[in-house]
Amino acid sequence: MPFYFGQTLSILVRTLPYILLRILVYLAFGVLFLIYWVLVYFVGQAAAALHDVARIVVWVVAFLISFPIVRLFREYFLYVLKIGHVAVISRLVIYGSLPEGVGQIAWGKDQVMGRFKETSLLFLVDRMVSAVIRSINRMMGRIGNFFSGIPGMEGLVKLAQIVLRFSLTYVDEAVMARNFLKPEETVWQSAERGLVLYAQSWKEILKTALVLGLASLSSYIILIVAFLIPALGLGKAYPAHKFLFVVSAFVLGAAVKLAFFDPWAMTSMVVTYLKETQNKAPDRGWEEKLEAVSGKFKEIKQKAFASASSAVSGTSTS
């Protein structure tokens, strides 16, 4: 199985400024999120003195408020930062270097905003690409269901499907990477062709995705256990705050995983995708299969056609 370990490691080292920035941002976000829940906990404890129901109300309200906070931070900072890193990785995989005289963080950000113009388009494309990838994986999962009838294989197939779903995030970022290598294509054309190429090359790409998904799942479990050990010790010493310590273990485990593991996993997936699809042309047969299983792919195809027509019209007018 081509895992491209050497090239992945080389690119990780070369994009160290992006990785360090991501580590700082994710860890800072994890600490701030933890502080938020610490404040919620103490406000809830104070409210409990007034009425037992008041504490429940505080937790419910805090939980509902946390969703838009996390979503806002993710969409308008974390994701742009991540896709900027993808742009730099893509350039290094294919061309070996960035343009001279530019900082990689500023260059990555400029590539994202120059290509997608505004973050709303970036998130729309990403969500639609993710939906199509889920359809592709379900289609491939039907092949796995054939083997589930074999004695002893059912559990293995189910485990593979769980790990595959867990690894989905790395695959959609890999497909998005193609956008930065095809400036002659519109965003929608690149997404359409990138998805067809993914389907054509799914065997090798999904092998890597399964390895990364399993490693991702394992790393999160290990980190939670590592943080739970001292958290439970503190909970035993201070039983009144045991719940707070347990929540902290989960939050810190997720933050550390996002900061340290995800850059490696994402880089591995992008490298594998670009290498496996390099010099391949989209196959019409696969395009028809995707149209049959995914309404979102049809929508992307329609947008690709419309954007290409607009581009041609704009060129003719000028």
Image (cartoon, rainbow, N blue to C red):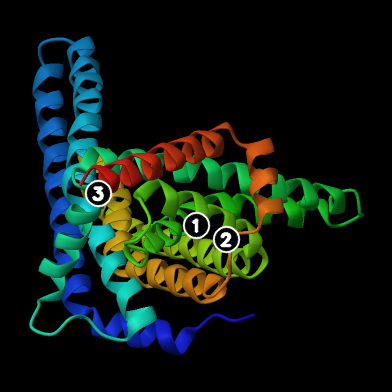
For the residue pair 152 and 202, the one nearer the viewer reads as: 202
What element does badge 3 sit on?
helix
Give yes or no for contact between labels 1 and 2 (Cβ–Cβ under 8 Å): yes
Look at label 2 and name its amino acid: Leu
Q: Quadrant of residue 288?
A: top right
> In whole angstroms, how far apart are the C-alphas of marks 2 and 3?
21 Å
Name the residue: 50% across, 69% down.
Answer: 273
Residue 78 position in % (x across, y down): 21, 52
Look at label 3 and name its amino acid: Phe
Residue 305 position in % (x across, y down): 46, 40
For marks 2 and 3, the one nearer the N-term is 3
Say the numbered circle drawn on residue 197. Answer: 2
Instruction: State which quarter of the image contains the N terminus.
Output: bottom right
For marks 3 and 1, the one nearer the N-term is 3
> In whole angstroms, how far apart are the C-alphas of marks 3 and 1?
16 Å
Give yes or no for contact between labels 2 and 3 (Cβ–Cβ under 8 Å): no
The residue singled out by tag 1 in the image is 194
Residue 301 position in % (x across, y down): 51, 40
Say the numbered circle drawn on residue 291. Answer: none
